[in-house]
Image (tube, rainbow, N blue to C red):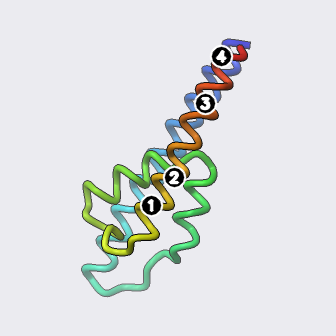
Amino acid sequence: MQMLFNLFLLLLAVVNVAAFVIVGLDKRKSLKEEERYPEVSFFLLASMFGSLGIFLGMFLFRHKIRKAYFPLGIGFMLAQQIVLLWLIYKLI
């Protein structure tokens, strides 16, 4: 069971790195005034446990922090996911 949890953590790391990179790419596209990723894609990635990567990317790249619903929504999803991961870990 522990091996399965470790595999899940690896997958979690991959999703969060991808989410972080996508926030950076979207910021670059916004500076170049190119077509950008839809906001729903950020929330979709966050719902797939990529909220930490998006949250860190938002503040590192200073992207999407002016819209109050974005940091609040992603932060709330991050808090939920931390609690859920803690509960899963306790059950193992």
Say whether marks 4 and 2 touch (CB < 8 Å): no
* Helix, strand or loop status at disc 2: helix
Residue position marked by numbered label 3 in the rendering: 85
Residue 54 falls in image quadrant: bottom left
What's the CA distance linking mark 3 and mark 4? 9 Å
What's the CA distance linking mark 1 and mark 4? 27 Å
Q: Which mark is residue 80?
A: none
The tag earlier along the polypeptide, 4 or 2, is 2
Q: Is residue 28 left or right of residue 75?
A: left
Image x and y of residue 66, in percent: 31, 73
* Helix, strand or loop status at disc 3: helix
The tag earlier along the polypeptide, 1 or 3, is 1
Image x and y of residue 10, in percent: 56, 29
Say whether marks 3 and 2 touch (CB < 8 Å): no
Residue position marked by numbered label 1 in the rendering: 72
Residue position marked by numbered label 2 in the rendering: 76
Pick the quarter of the image with the C terminus: top right
